[in-house]
Image: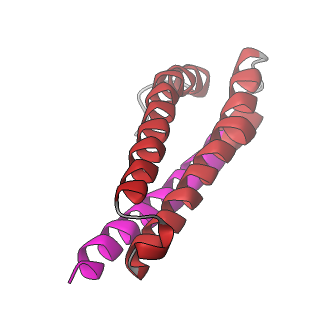
């Protein structure tokens, strides 16, 4: 059961995502910088085990999905909420949820590759 009417919910989601994406972009920058620095410390890509390449590939895919969510879904969501286009905003929120679920699955897969690849 929802706590409030769709306009209030969508305004709330828009505000939550505004804060959320600040931290996502910080995390993306830190992960890329620290990851590529560690690759450099270990002698470059040629020295890395296969599971690390798989982790890098899935991490880059996750970052690409988040970039699409931000530029292709969240920004339009904000415009739709501002224009009070509630039906379209609700549909955009549904897309965001699905893409975040895909990223969650990729994240769990990445953790599994990290754990199993180390053994």
Q: Visible in this render: residue 54?
A: no
Relative to 14, is 48 above or below? below
105 relative position to 73: left or right? left
Relative to 41, is 44 above or below? below
Query: Percent from the top left, x then y, of residue 49?
Result: 38, 79
111 relative position to 29: left or right? left
* Magenta stretch, main secondary structure class: helix
Q: Extreme bottom residue here?
A: 119
Quadrant of the image containing the N terminus: top left
68 relative position to 116: left or right? right
Picture residue at 54% right of the left edge, 67% below the top:
57
Quadrant of the image occupied by residue 52: bottom left
Picture residue at 64% right of the left edge, 43% below the top:
67
Viewer-proximal residue, 18 or 118? Answer: 118
Query: Percent from the top left, x then y, of residue 72?
Result: 74, 41
Q: What's the magenta region?
A: 93-119
Residue 83: say if magenta: no
């Amino acid at each position: 059961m929802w706590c409030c009417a769709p306009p209030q919910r969508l305004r709330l989601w828009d505000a939550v995502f505004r804060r959320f994406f600040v931290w996502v972009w910080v995390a993306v920058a830190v992960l890329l910088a620290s990851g590529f620095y560690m690759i450099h410390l270990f002698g470059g890509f040629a020295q890395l085990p296969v599971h690390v390449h798989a982790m890098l590939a899935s991490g880059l895919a996750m970052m690409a999905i988040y970039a699409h969510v931000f530029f292709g879904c969240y920004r339009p969501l904000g415009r739709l909420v501002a224009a009070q286009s509630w039906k379209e905003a609700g549909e955009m929120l549904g897309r965001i949820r699905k893409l975040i679920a895909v990223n969650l699955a990729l994240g769990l897969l990445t953790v599994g590759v990290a754990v199993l690849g180390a053994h």
